[in-house]
Image: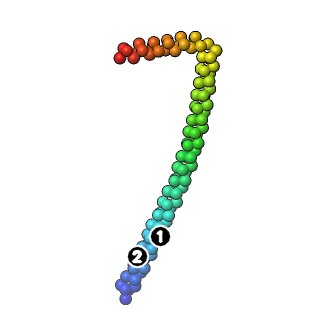
Amino acid sequence: MAAQTEADALKKDFDELRHSVEQLSKDVSSLSKSLTDQLKAEASSVARQARKSAASVADEINTKGQESVEAVENAVKEHPFQGLLIAFGVGLVLSQFLSRR
């Protein structure tokens, strides 16, 4: 009879242990899903912020480029002969540089 109660107690302990392990497994799975969702949200936020920053930089570069083109156009309009000589000089230097290769 004592062996039977010991066996029953062990079986009960084993069932409780199995239940605890199952619960632990569910908790770990839930925690993992929660962390994954949180990381996805943070990554999405960082990506959105990076896109905004890239768009801002692109707009700034575009603006600076347009200002530079306008400045060159104005300089050429004000001094056409000087612009022609500069273009000729740049072409000459580039042709010498490229012909040496």
- The CA span between labels 2 and 1 is 14 Å
Question: Mark number for residue 97?
Answer: none
**Residue closer to the observer: 98 or 48:** 98
Dot 1 surroundings within 10 Å: few (below 14), some, or many (20 or more)? few
Question: What amino acid type is highlighted by mark number 1?
Answer: Gln
Dot 2 surroundings within 10 Å: few (below 14), some, or many (20 or more)? few
Residue marked by disc 2: 14
Identity of the residue drawn at 52% across and 53% down:
39
Residue marked by disc 1: 23
Residue 82, quarter of picture: top right
Secondary structure beneath dot 1 equals: helix
- Quarter of the image containing the N terminus? bottom left
Q: x, y percentage for residue 36? A: 49, 56
* Above or below, 29 relative to 46: below
Q: x, y percentage for residue 35? A: 51, 57
- Quarter of the image containing the C terminus? top left
Viewer-nearest of discs 2 and 1: 1
Question: What amino acid type is highlighted by mark number 2?
Answer: Phe
* Above or below, 10 relative to 23: below
**First in sequence: mark 2 vs mark 1:** 2
Identity of the residue drawn at 45% across and 66% down:
25
Secondary structure beneath dot 2 equals: helix
**Residue 6 horizontal side relative to residue 45, left or right:** left
**Residue 6 horizontal side relative to residue 88, left or right:** left
Residue closest to the far bottom: 1
Q: x, y percentage for residue 45? A: 56, 49
Residue 13, quarter of picture: bottom left
Identity of the residue drawn at 58% across and 44% down:
49
